[in-house]
Amino acid sequence: MTKLWGGRFQKSAESWVDEFGASIGFDQQLVMEDIEGSLAHVTMLGVQGILPEEDVEKIKWGLNELKKRAENGELEYKIENEDIHLNIEKMLIDLIGPVGGKLHTGRSRNDQVATDVHLFLKKRVKEVIELIETFQKTILQKAEQHIDTIAPGYTHMQRAQPISFAHHLMVYFWMLERDKERFKESMKRIDISPLGAGAMAGTTFPINRQLTADLLGFSRIYENSMDAVSDRDFIVEFLSNSSLLMTHLSRFAEEIIIWSTDEFKFIELDDSFSTGSSIMPQKKNPDMAELIRGKTGRVYGNLIGLLTVLKGTPLTYNKDMQEDKEGMFDTLQTILGSLKIFEGMVRTMTVNTERLHKAVHSDFSNATELADYLATKGMPFRKAHEVTGKLVFTCIQKGIFLQDLSIDEMKAESELIEEDVYEVLKPEAAVSRRLSQGGTGFEQVRVQIEKAKACLN
């Protein structure tokens, strides 16, 4: 077979070499963007008088015909044609004749592939943002149902202070909000057109780069042709944003996994998001949460992989940069799937309010309340901390909790303690009294939820 670029070559590569160098196995996902970019390019060639109108219309017809076939899954890609660009060009020439070869006038595969990827990410990042918002809405709905549900809060995986369960859930709303902001911000750097940069130095043809940018819906163009074809920062940024998103999903997944154990039993996952064991009939495993936690590693790997590819490549385009796409495609598929799964998992999970109630009434998470109580009565906080610690130690020795101590036992450590301390030690009081902005107090959680709703409007 004669390559579309093979004029200066006297010898063909062996088939296994072609297979190693080909990218069509994965970059065929860019087929619609490739055709879209070609339609804009040939339209511009006509407007600028670079190609006669007759050729332009024939090429447009051919491209639109290939677009229909692509939509119907009727295109047959060949390794010999290396990538999506040469496959489409070869199909076009086979369809409309030699005039199809004029499509590449004033263009290189270098600016063509960069344009395709910019178009691809511009569409897909919008999908990511939409799925993040859908998940945020689900978290909000679940949080509203559990504002008054009290749960143990943890530091160092040790019981720390009682909190509203809604307050805990809302942590992930705000993490996702920042993730969403990062993806939105990245659109500024995705929404740039490289088309017309040529191989790296521009072109002698009187092209109109702004026209193709407008036709493709880009807000601006790269101002430096070398930058246009060598830039993969926007993909790195997508992978970085995706890694942070997966970090947050993985942390949430870890908590879902812990909460669903027999040791905790704070929640129960719906059967549709759980699996069983092939040998242990009693098992109900949180496999989807575990899988999301595991897939986080591959997203990190894709980021590190591209950074490693780019760190040693001189300007401008190098074949190494073909490695920018597989990780991007894989990451996109991973985060879209993870967001869909997680949304359903949270929407359908059951919160075991009785178990949570029992948990906060059988621990020392109210110890800070006692220390604060003493501080409000004039005792220096460090002294109050010491007194409370001694009372906790007394409880541990007796196998009881602070609220189970008699008033005399408490007064033995401080005469400042009165009968009203028992009200202070109630988990409900501990939560409701925390009215500092952003705190876990029930009223503050309601304020937080209203602010969160405003973020989605």
Image (spheres, grey):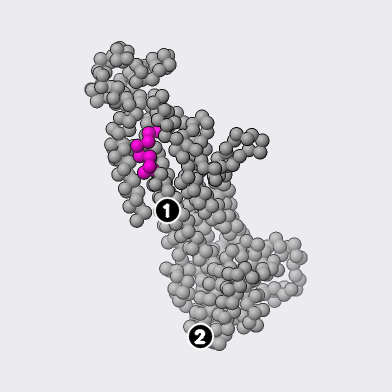
As shown in the figure, which amino acid type bears the numbered disc 1? Answer: Glu
Residue 152 seen by the camera: no
Q: Which residues are magenta?
A: 143-152
Crowding near the residue tagged with mark 2, few <14, some 14–19, many ≥20 C-alpha atoms within 10 Å: few
Query: Looking at the image, which is closer to me, 183 or 148?
Result: 148
Crowding near the residue tagged with mark 1, few <14, some 14–19, many ≥20 C-alpha atoms within 10 Å: some
Residue 323 seen by the camera: yes
Hey, which residue is sitting farthest left in the picture?
A: 378
Residue lying at 24% horizontally and 25% vertically, measured from the top left: 376
Q: Mark 2 and mark 1 in contact? Answer it, CB < 8 Å.
A: no
Magenta-drawn stretch contains 365: no
Q: Quadrant of residue 416?
A: top left
* Marks 2, 1: nearer the viewer: 1
Residue lying at 42% horizontally and 57% vertically, measured from the top left: 184
Q: Position of residue 412 (x, y in %)?
A: 30, 12
Quadrant of the image for the N terminus?
bottom right
Q: Position of residue 196 (x, y in %)?
A: 51, 73
Where is mark 2, residue-wise? 49
As shown in the figure, which amino acid type bears the numbered disc 2? Answer: Gly
Q: Position of residue 223 (x, y in %)?
A: 45, 68
Q: Position of residue 152 (x, y in %)?
A: 41, 31
Disc 2 to disc 1, C-alpha distance: 46 Å
Q: Report whether 454 appears left or right of 187.
A: left
Please, what secondary structure does the residue beneath circle 2 have? loop
Please, what secondary structure does the residue beneath circle 1 have? helix
Where is mark 1, residue-wise? 133
Residue lying at 56% horizontally and 77% vertically, measured from the top left: 64
Quadrant of the image for the C terminus?
bottom left
Residue lying at 62% horizontally and 61% vertically, measured from the top left: 26
Query: Looking at the image, which is closer to me, 263 or 349?
Result: 349
Numbered badge on residue 335: none
Q: Quadrant of residue 57?
A: bottom right
